[in-house]
Amino acid sequence: APPPEAPPEAAGGRIRLNTRAKAWEPAPGFGMQAQATVENVRAKLQCFGCVAGSEALWQEAPGGMAPATSICTLTVMVAMECFMPLEQVLTATKEAILAAASESSFVYVIGQRKAPFVSTPQGFAVMLGAMQDPNKACWDAYGKGFCQRGGACYWQHPQSMVHVNVNVATVVTTPVVVMQQGSDEYLAAAA
């Protein structure tokens, strides 16, 4: 269904606002839904052969950031023994993020229709935003990642977001065996 029509403009090109309209507030629980989305990404990555594990660390963004923003650092650990190109691991992680967000009714990948992923030296970054009502959403803000209308926009913009930093790390997964010989202990890599 197409989004509702924008309100008529008043004299001077300004949009008339309804003074009796209820102020829009983000739905409670976005943080929990964003965390569930990241956990879904982690579960999807476990099915990817070269991923030895992953870890998500959460923190609140520095004060004063609007909209309300959290930061998640998702570290994807790739087995050193795996000879998979880094780009394949990054692509699988991006696909897992898009799939996990599409399975959520409330979490949306910001800029999904344009360029949602920004390369970093260790991986990439992406923004997840709260979307309460797709029929009232500003599809420039959600789809492109920006809205040229700014404060004059009639549509709903993300009021809560999570900045996700994805880092890829290489880990050794060869098991280590402790062998005893006499009273001395020796470490040896299992063959």
Image (cartoon, rainbow, N blue to C red):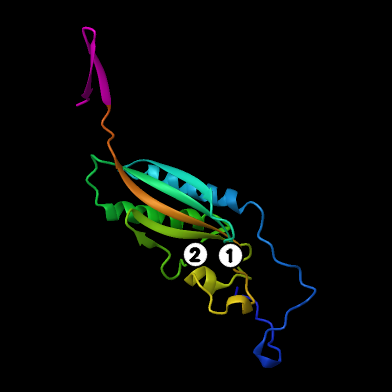
Main structural element of the magenta stretch: helix, strand or loop?
A: strand
Kind of residue indicated by mark 1: Pro
The single residue placed furthest to the right in the displayed view is 20
Q: Residue at x 43, y 48 (%)?
A: 74
Left or right, 18 with respect to 108, comes to right
Q: Rounded to the nearest whole Å, what is the CA distance between mark 2 and mark 1?
A: 9 Å
Q: Are marks 2 and 1 in contact (CB under 8 Å)?
A: yes
Question: Is residue 180 in the magenta section?
Answer: yes
Query: To which residue does mark 2 refer?
Result: 110
Q: The C terminus is located in which quarter? A: top left
Element under label 1?
Answer: loop
Q: Which residues are magenta?
A: 176-191
Q: Nearer the viewer, residue 136 or 67?
A: 67
Closer-to-camera residue (131/160): 160
Q: Position of residue 122 (x, y in %)?
A: 33, 53
Label number found at residue 158: 1
- Which secondary structure lies at badge 2? loop
Residue 31 spot, x, y in % from top left: 58, 51
- Residue at (38, 63) in percent of width and height: 118
**Magenta run includes residue 51:** no
* Horizontal side, residue 149 vs residue 20: left or right: left
User: Which quadrant of the figure has residue 79?
Assistant: top left
Image height check: is 39 above or below 190? below
Depicted 161 relative to depicted 58: above or below = below
Dot 2 surroundings within 10 Å: few (below 14), some, or many (20 or more)? many
Q: Is residue 24 above or below residue 148?
A: above
Amino acid bearing label 2: Ile
